[in-house]
Amino acid sequence: MTNTATDIVIRTAQVKIPNGDLQIDAYLAEPVAQGTFPAVIVVQEIFGVNIHIREVTERLAKQGYVAIAPAIFQRIAPGFEAGYTPEDIQIGRKYKEQTKADEILSDIQATIAYLKTLANVKGDAIASIGFCFGGHIVYLAATLPEIKATASFYGGGIVNSTPGGGAPTITRTPDIKGTLYAFFGTQDAGIPQEQTEQIEAELNKHQIPHKVFRYPADHGFFCNHRGSYNPEAAADAWNKVKELFQQQLH
């Protein structure tokens, strides 16, 4: 995560997003400069809003976005944050299994509403990016009318499940409103190639503006805190994300 000379000066804060009686913890990173900026919602893996997710949020802010990472497990495990040990994976999966699609969409909608209250946010220019479980969630959230662009990284289960049960998330593909980029590793045992092909076929079928990128990499290849980190794939994918957000939010 090296900084470049063009990085914008940013500030970060822990904030609360109101959603009815629920107060969702979130990590906010934004340019210090005056003006209005497009916004990006960053959706965590099963490990909470941990160092990786905070770093991604900061990287986006340095590119000129107001970036916010809401705690997706707020209802189940407030304050939860973990690393990548087998024990962490076990706990994270347990929490993931307790989530429900309608609650998650409600929390993302509340995050959009919160962003629109910020004086430095262009309310009509909002995108999302998510990783692992978050990659699945942003595919779901791409159906929300305010989301102009979605970057979905190795979202497992899109083809055959949805949080809380019911019709698989892929069945919502016709409702996607903006442009979607999906990123997968061809060595990811959890997301077989035929599933990525199914997703691509559905996006094509319903004429959703999209691109699907496949890298000779494993699950979690974008995360430099994981053993599966693949610097080449991560760098290329980051350039694609920047291209997507530049084209759709500016």
Image: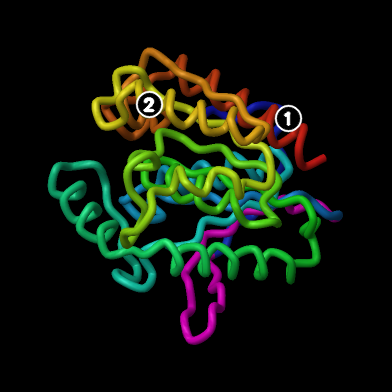
The crowding category of the residue bearing disc 2, from other C-alpha atoms within 10 Å (few below 14, some 14 to 19, many at least 20), is many
Q: Residue at x 32, y 62 (%)?
A: 164
| Residue 134, x across and y down, in percent | 43, 47
Furthest residue in direction left, as rendered: 87
Q: Is residue 42 magenta?
A: no
State how far apart marks 2 and 1 are (Cα): 25 Å
Q: Which mark is residue 221?
A: 2
Residue at 76%, 38% in the rendered image: 248
Q: Which residues are magenta?
A: 14-34
Task: Kindly tell me whether residue 158 is visible in this rendering.
Answer: yes
Q: Quadrant of residue 135?
A: top left
First along the sequence among labels 2 and 1: 1
Residue assigned mark 1: 6
On screen, 156 above or below 57?
Answer: above
Local packing at callout 1 (Cα closer than 10 Å; few below 14, some 14-19, many 20+) is few
**In this rendering, would 219 be left or right of 40?**
left
Residue flagged by tag 1: what amino acid is it?
Thr
Write the residue at 47% across / 69% down: 25
137 and 222: which one is in front?
Answer: 137
